[in-house]
Amino acid sequence: MIKVSVMYPNGPDARFDEVYYRDKHMPMVKNLMGDYCKYYTVDKAISTGSSDSNAPYIAMGHLFCDSVDAFQAGFGQHTKEIMADIPNYTNQKPVIQISEVLVG
């Protein structure tokens, strides 16, 4: 299994609508990908209470798929539609990492 992590950088001017991302964007991505996406998770940064309370990423979404080929088959045909939705919830450019899940 692989995990596609989509991470949104934090910063003083970062805007991120977590409700839209959680309730609209990620369900849309799952619906478009169908069975190619097994499930997804959404993470939100929390303040640690220290003076350096800005986490490097304000939020993250993770897509879990059987393989890179499965991800590409499910996501690839919908890339334009998915990417066009980004301005609806953030002004940040996502950082993407694909990882092999070793323990799940």
Image: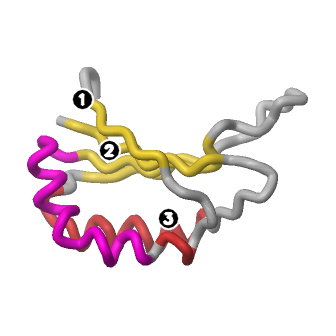
Range of the magenta residues? 65-84
Residue at which label 2 appears: 4
Label 2 to label 1: alpha-carbon separation: 9 Å
Name the foreground residue: 19 vs 33: 33
In the rendered image, which quarter contains the N terminus? top left
From the viewer's perspective, is 36 left or right of 95? left
Quarter of the rendering containing residue 24: bottom left
Residue plotted at (50% across, 46% down): 7
Q: Secondary structure at mark 1?
A: strand
Q: Secondary structure at mark 3?
A: helix
Label 2 to label 3: alpha-carbon separation: 16 Å
Q: Provide residue 15's location: percent of width, then percent of height.
A: 70, 63
Q: Provide residue 92's location: percent of width, then percent of height.
A: 60, 59
Q: Is residue 48 magenta?
A: no
Residue at which label 3 appears: 22
From the viewer's perspective, is 12 left or right of 77? right
Secondary structure that dominates the magenta span: helix
From the viewer's perspective, is 3 left or right of 94? left
Q: Amino acid at mark 2?
A: Val
User: Which of the marked residues, 2 or 3, is nearer the chain's N terminus?
Assistant: 2
Which dot marks residue 100? 1
